[in-house]
Image: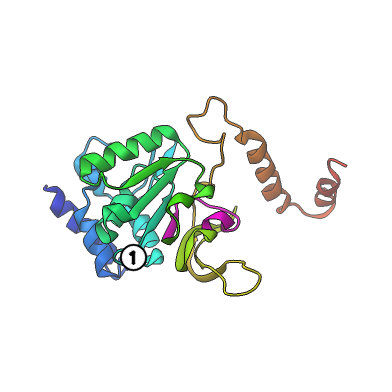
Amino acid sequence: MEPAVLRDDMVASLEHEMKGLVRSDNVGLALRTVPRHEFVPIDAEQGAYADQSFDHRGTRILAPSIVARLLEALDVREDDSVLVVGAGVGYTSAVLAEIVGERNVHAIDITRTIVYEARENLESAGYGGVFVDCGDGADGLPEYAPFDRILVEAAAIEPPRTLVSQLADDGRLVIPLGSGIQRLAAVEPSDSDSGSPETVEEFGKTAFAPLLVEGEQSDTIERNRTNREDREFAERHAQTRRGWEHEWIDWDGY
């Protein structure tokens, strides 16, 4: 079956009343245009258009339904300047490039091998004008700020303030928030004196890997996530304890 037909079937499914994930014309048209098979490294071409995620080289290739949710939450407009934190294989950036233009899309990923692959995928798919850089996503790309839209494809407890500071005055940041149960949230700069960002809209529960910091990427010589993972597991486990056992955990380490 021709890729164009497969893309049309994929988007039609996402537009269906039972899912209703694609609601805007620009998102639907972009998803119908981008050749997803150029970004998903599987043998069967039709499998690239199935609504499923893939693990690949330490990153997660998001299912089309998840990409649709993110883009609808982002509410991107033509000619917006966009930053994608978590470049992955480059697919989300390509879809955004169809909406706002290649030169308006910037992506960053902490894993160097992923950055190289994203660049290659974007080039071969016809989106070589998308800028992809290697670095700590929480630091953003200040040299290209401000951004009208920032999309974070990784979870955090709260929106990184550095990213919020790189938003335009009427900008919008979409990010999964939470450590256990996550919610997809849209955040905008605050007009109050506190300067704290405001969550203006939520889009239900979701599940993303945590936003990595330097040393946690999959291609580093020695990963340092062990202590952090142990601490987060202990905190989640402690919340399920009751009675004397919980009291004992509270005293542990004194």
In magenta stretch: residue 49: no
Residue extending farthest to the right is: 254
Percent of width and height locating residue 206: 48, 57
Residue extending farthest to the top is: 221
Task: Identify residue for label 1.
Answer: 21
Q: Quadrant of residue 15?
A: bottom left
Range covered by the magenta-colored residues = 149-163
Residue extending farthest to the front is: 143
Q: Residue at x 39, y 48 (%)?
A: 107
Secondary structure of the residue carrying numbered label 1:
loop
In the picture shown, does residue 187 fall above or below 44? below
Note whether residue 136 is visible.
yes
Q: Quadrant of residue 193?
A: bottom right
Colour convention: rainbow
Q: Nearer the viewer, residue 39 or 251?
A: 39
In the picture shown, does residue 83 fall above or below 213? below
Percent of width and height locating residue 211: 53, 47
Query: Would you call the spot at circle 1 few (<14 residues within 10 Å), some (14-19), or many (20 or more)?
Result: many
Q: Quadrant of residue 45?
A: top left
Quadrant the C terminus occupies? top right
Note whether residue 160 is visible.
no
Q: Residue at x 39, y 60 (%)?
A: 70
In the picture shown, does residue 19 fall above or below 7? below
Percent of width and height locating residue 179: 60, 53
Percent of width and height locating residue 164: 53, 60
Instruction: Tell me which amino acid carries mark 1.
Output: Leu
- Say left or right for 19 vs 203: left
In this rendering, the count of numbered labels is 1
